[in-house]
Image (tube, rainbow, N blue to C red):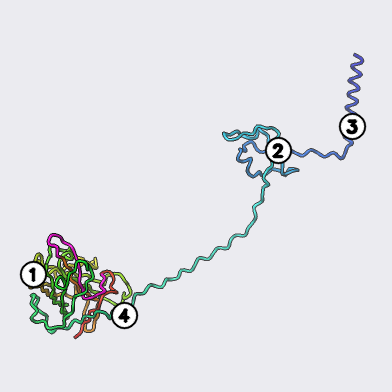
Amino acid sequence: MIKSNKQIIFFLVTVLAFISLACNLTNIAAPTPILFPTVDFTMTAIFGTVYPLTTPTNPSLIFISPTSVEENNIETVTSTNELIPTQTAESPTLTSVPTQTPKPTKTKEKPISYVGPNRHNVYPVEAVQLDSPPTIDGVFDEWGLDKYNINYVVYGLDNWRDAADCSGTFMIGWDKHALYIAAKIKDDQYQQHAIDENIFKGDSLEILFDQQISTDYYLAALSNDDYQLGISPGNPDPGINSEAYIWFPQSVEGKQSDVKIASTSTADGYRVEVKIPWSVFNVNPSVGSIYGFVFSISDNDNPSKDVQQGMVSNVKTRQLVNPMSWGDLILRK
C-alpha cells in the first residue's frame, strides 16, 4: 500500500512539473479554429461558393463534418474529417451604372409617291364631243367617227384562230352626260349564257378606266380610282337580256342598270351601242381630260360551258391589275 502511495505521489509531481514547463514555452502557436458550415447545407451548396462567417487561418481548407451534410439520392458523404477545397468567394466588381441609350428620334418616313405624268402616251383613243347623243338602238347610222381596232390577243392565244374568231373595231364619243361607244365585233360563234359577275365567261366586252392617271401613275396595282366594267350584248343572243356589271372597285361592285345597251346580230358577229353615264366612273368630264383606258372583247366558243377562252384588246400591253399597262382616253372637242 505504501508502495502504491509513493507511486501516486511521484505521478502527481511529474504531472505538475510538466505543466509548469509547458507554461514557460512561448513559441508554441494557438491551434487554428475549425469552421463548420451550417447544418442546412446540401450537396449542391457544398460544391457551390462558400462564404465563411469568419476568416480562417487557411481560407482554402474547410473541414466538413459528415453530420453537416444531408443525404440525397445521388451522392452521400461517407468519409470523416475530410478536407475539401472551397471555391474562393469573389467579391462582385462594382461597375458604373450604364448610361441610358437615348431613344432614337422618331422621324416621319417620307411617303412613297406614285405621282407621274397625266398620260401614258401609248395606244391613245380620242373621244369626240358630240353635238347630240346617238340613239342607243344598235344601229350606227348617226356615227361617222374614227374607228379603232381591237386586234391584240392578250389572253388565250392558243384558243384564238383568226380575226373571224374574235376581233373588232369601235368608235367613241362623249358629252357632258355620258361616254358613248359603238362596237362592231367579228365572232363566228356567239356564246353567252352567264349572268351578273360571270358575264366575262361568255362573249362580252370589257372597259378598263383609270379616273386619275397622274396621282398613281407609277402604282402597278389597282386602286379605288380604277374601274373594270363588263358589257354583255345579250343572253342567249345579242339584244336579249343584255346587262352591265362592275367588278372593280369593289366598293361599287354590282350590276349597273344606268348603263344603256343595245345589240344586234350580224352575218359575222354582232354590233353593240353603249351609253355609260359619267357618274359610273365618278368623274366630271371636260375638253382635254385624259383617262386611262382599254377596250377588250372576251370570247367563248363552247356552247356547253361558261368559260373565258380568250380576250382581244385595243391595247397590246393590257394587264388587268396594272394600270401602267393601259392606254389613254382623250376627250377632245
Asked whether disc 4 touches disc 2, contact meaning CB atoms under 8 Å apart, the reply is no
x 24%, y 68%: residue: 249
x 50%, y 65%: residue: 103
Q: Residue farthest to the bottom?
A: 333
- Please tell me which residue lies in front, 227 or 199: 199
Quick check: can you spot residue 203? yes
Q: Residues within 10 Å of mark 2 (few under 14, many from 20)?
A: few
First along the sequence among labels 1 and 2: 2
Is the magenta region chiefly helix, strand or loop?
loop
Q: State how far apart marks 3 and 2 are (Cα).
A: 35 Å
The residue singled out by tag 2 in the image is 83
Q: State how far apart marks 4 and 3 are (Cα).
A: 120 Å
Q: Given the image, on which type of amino acid does mark 1 rest?
A: Gly
SS type, badge 2: strand
The residue singled out by tag 4 in the image is 117
Disc assigned to residue 239:
1
Q: Is residue 308 magenta?
A: yes
Image quarter in which the C terminus is found: bottom left
Residue 276, quarter of picture: bottom left
First along the sequence among labels 4 and 3: 3
Q: Which residues are magenta?
A: 301-319
SS type, badge 1: loop
SS type, badge 3: helix
Q: Position of residue 241 (x, y in %)?
A: 9, 66
SS type, badge 4: loop
For residue 75, side relative to residue 253 (left or right): right
Quick check: can you spot residue 222? no
Disc assigned to residue 20:
3
